[in-house]
Amino acid sequence: MKNMNKPLIFCLLLALGAAAAYALRPYGKGAEAKVSWMTVSSLKTGQEYYMEVAADGAVATRTAAKDAVVTKRGKIAVQLAKDFFREIENSEVIATQGSSSGKTVFYRGDVLNISAYISGELRIINSPLNKFGEAFSYAFNEVRKAAAKLPDEHALKGFLTAELLEGDQLQQFQLKAAKDQELKIVETYDIQKVAPLLKAIKQPLRMIPLETEDEMRDIQDFINLRQLYGLRKLFYLPSTRGTFKCQILDADKAAVKYQGPDKPKAKTAPAPKKARSWTPPAKN
C-alpha cells in the first residue's frame, strides 16, 4: 500500500464505495415490491375507497361519495404495514392471481381490487373482500383504521390514473375513436417527458398524485399536442405499452351545500276578501 500512488488508491476506494452503494440500492422492480394500491367498492352504497400502502408506513387514501372527495396522507406504524404485506404475500387469492369477480351475483358486501408486486411481478386481483381470508381482512382493517386518523390533505391538486384497455373495451374504443380521428401510437420516449403520465401507465389503476399546477398543465399540454382522443380530464392514450384510459380525479372536494335562504319564508296570510256592495233592484 505504501508504494501505491495516491490517485490509484483514491480510484480503488471510489470503486469500492460505488459497489457498496449499488448493493444497497434495490433494482427498479424491487423498489416497488413493497408498494400496494387498492380500491374498495361498496355494492350497497356505491362508495369507493382508495388506499395505497408502502412498506415504510407511508399511506394515502381517497374516499369518494357522491359530490364529496376526501384525501388523507401521512405515515402509520411500520409494523402495521409489515403485517399487511405479509398477509398480501400469504393470500392464496393473490398468489394464484385468481379473480372471482364473476361470483358476486348475490354478494352485497365490499369488492376489493388490489394491485401488488409478488416476486417482482405486478398482479391485479378483483374479488369480494371476504374471499381473501380472515387474517388478510384483519390486517387490512387495522391499516384502514390507522389511515383514518391521518390529517386531511388539501394542498394536492389531483390524481392521475390509467386503466389498460383489453378485449371488448379496447375494440369498442378503437371503433368509436376511428370514426372521429386517426389514432396514432405514442412512443414511450415521448410519454416519459411527462413523469406522472409514464408512472400511471407503468402502474395501472394506481392514483398518481399531482402535486403542482405545473404537473396538471404539462398533462393538458401533452393532450393538446398529441391530439389525444377524449376530454380534458378523461382521455385515451394509445402507446407502445398498450392503450390506456386515463383520468384526472379530484383530490379534495367538499359537499355542495344548500345555497338557498337560511330560513324558509313565512307564508303570508291571504288578503281578506272585499265585501261586495248590494244594490237594491230598480222600481218599475
Image (tube, rainbow, N blue to C red):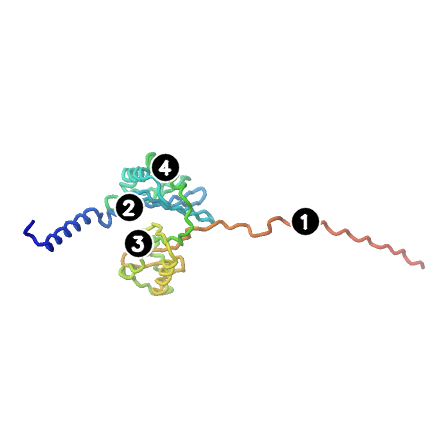
The disc label shown at residue 199, or none: 3
* In this rendering, the label closer to the viewer, 3 or 2: 3
- SS for dot 4: helix
Disc 3 crowd, CA 10 A, few/some/many (<14, 14-19, 20+)? some
**Residue 136 tag number:** none
- Residue sitting at x 22%, y 49%: 27
Which residue is label 2 attached to? 123
Instruction: Work out whether 156 lies above or below 107.
Output: below
- Name the amino acid type tagged 3: Lys
Local secondary structure at mark 1: loop
Does residue 260 appear anywhere in the picture? yes
Residue type at tag 2: Arg
Do the residues bearing badges 4 and 1 touch, measured as CB atoms within 8 Å? no
Q: Are marks 3 and 4 in contact (CB under 8 Å)?
A: no
Distance CA(mark 3)–CA(mark 2): 16 Å
Of circles 4 and 2, which is in front?
A: 4
Secondary structure, mark 2, is strand
Question: Who's the residue at 43% across and 47% down the image?
Answer: 70
- Residue 199 x, y percent position in the rendering: 30, 54
Which dot marks residue 267?
1
Q: Amino acid at mark 4?
A: Glu
Q: Residue lying farthest top?
A: 134
First reached walking from the N terminus: tag 2 or tag 1: 2
Q: Which residue is mark 4?
A: 142
Spatial CA distance of label 4 from label 1 is 53 Å
SS for dot 3: helix
Q: Disc 3 to disc 4, how far (Cα)?
A: 28 Å
